[in-house]
Amino acid sequence: MPNLAIFTICVNGSIRDAKAHLRKLIAAAQEGPQAITEHGRPAVVVLSSDDYARLQRKVEPLSQFFARAGFEGVQIERVRAAARDEGEV
């Protein structure tokens, strides 16, 4: 996931501190995914419920999309062309 913000939590903090950090973490997750580190290493990522729902959506296969869209009778011709470099458009 690009542009993760790092939200470091002190393991030895008090419950009051954890609650304060949790509110900040929830607010930050509304803006984008937040990585939580443990001992300086990424441990988990917190997402907003909207981001999580978007990740859980099932992607339908392209063949089902075309069948649903009514393209059954359309003939598609494959054009054989020379391979392009990744930098070409």
Image: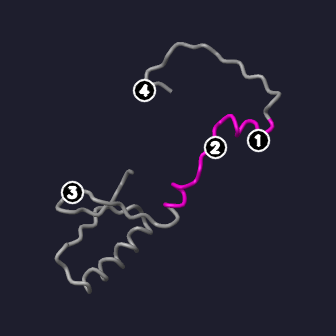
Q: Are marks 1 and 2 in contact (CB under 8 Å)?
A: yes
Give the labeled residue for mark 4. 87
Say whether disc 3 or disc 1 marks the residue closer to the N-terminus. Answer: 3
| Frontmost residue, 40 versus 28 | 40
Q: Secondary structure at mark 2?
A: loop
Looking at the rendering, which quadrant does residue 44 occupy? Answer: bottom left
The disc placed on residue 84 is none
Q: Is-magenta flag for residue 86?
A: no
Disc with the residue nearer the chain's start (3 vs 2)? 3
54 within the magenta span: yes
* Count of marks overlaid on the render: 4
Q: Which residues are magenta?
A: 52-70
Q: CA distance from mark 4 to mark 2?
A: 29 Å
Give me the C-alpha separation between circle 3 and circle 2: 35 Å
The residue that appears at 68% across and 34% down in the rendered structure is: 63
Which residue is disc 3 drawn over?
41
Check disc 2 and give the amino acid type: Glu
Dot 2, how many residues are within 10 Å of its Cα: few (below 14), some (14-19), or many (20+)?
A: few
Distance from disc 4 to disc 1, alpha carbons, whole Å, reads 34 Å
Disc 3 residue type (three-letter): Arg
* Residue 68: image tag: 1
Residue at the spot of label 2: 60
